[in-house]
Amino acid sequence: MTIEMLYFAWVRERVGVAEERVNPPAEVTTVGELVDWLAGLDDAHADAFAERGRLRAAVDQAFVAFDTPIAGAREIAIFPPVTGG
Amino acid sequence: MIHVAVQRNAIDLPVEMARAEMAGAGAVVTFTGLVRADDGVDTLELEHYPGATEAALRVVAQTAVDRWALQAATIVHRVGPMGPGERIVFVAATAPHRGAALEACAYLIDRLKTDAPFWKRETRGGEASWVEARETDEAAAARWQAE
């Protein structure tokens, strides 16, 4: 399954790219497991995803919890808590 | 009528006020958020999640329209770089009476601060840093669910 990953704010800066395509193995079934798998790719991903409590996620542009299944997801975004307004 | 916009150009108050003042309205309540000029910020830069941001703002606006039977709701948010004194955000609630408009305006700004994917990065004396989310913003947004 190919997923389009999007990163914002300091998560984007630490990963080093704003977007990338990934192909996680079949045993990766939730957003949280995906983040753990991404953290194992290299030092930049590990640094970006070191503190789960400071991360938020969206699946196909809807905010979700980390136990949300990723089956069928096309676009998953990982970012810090929002600070608009 | 709902109007949401995410834009790099300045927020034009006369244009936005004219849009909010609908025929038949008795009350328009607005909120304008500005880049603070008194705490040493040189520039503020707003990043967002294109597509998702506009959808999130539309949900916030539609929820307010439904809850308070508004005639119109407006949310306009800047992105990109801006300086002290510039407008970051403008919201307006238009209703037949002031009670609904006052409450709905507070709801619009409280909810958008936690529900829409914007991130602030500020520069002070040449040092840039990402603004941390505030628990008080979460509490302000949550109070609307308790009722």
Image (tube, coloured by chain):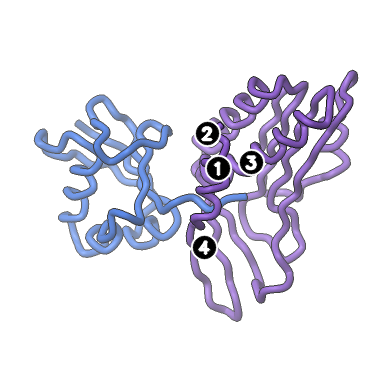
Q: Which mark is residue B6?
A: 3
Element at label 1: helix
Q: Amino acid at mark 2?
A: Gln
- The chain assigned the colour blue in the figure is A
Foreground residue among B134 and B40: B134
The answer to which quarter of the image holds residue B23 is top right
Q: Dot 2 lies on which element? A: helix
Give the foreground label among 2 and 3.
2
Q: Of label 4 and label 3, which has the lower sequence position?
A: 3
Q: Is residue B45 above or below residue B55?
A: below
- Where residue A55 sits in the image (x, y, percent)? 35, 52
* Labels 4 and 2 touching (C-beta < 8 A): no
From the image, tell me which residue sits under label 4.
Answer: B131
For the residues labelled 1 and 2, say whether their Cβ atoms are less than 8 Å apart.
yes
Question: Tag 4's secondary structure?
Answer: loop
- Disc 1 target residue: B141
* Chain identifier, colour purple: B
Q: Is residue B135 above or below residue A74?
A: below
Amino acid under disc 1: Ala
> Would you name the residue on which mark 2 appears?
B145
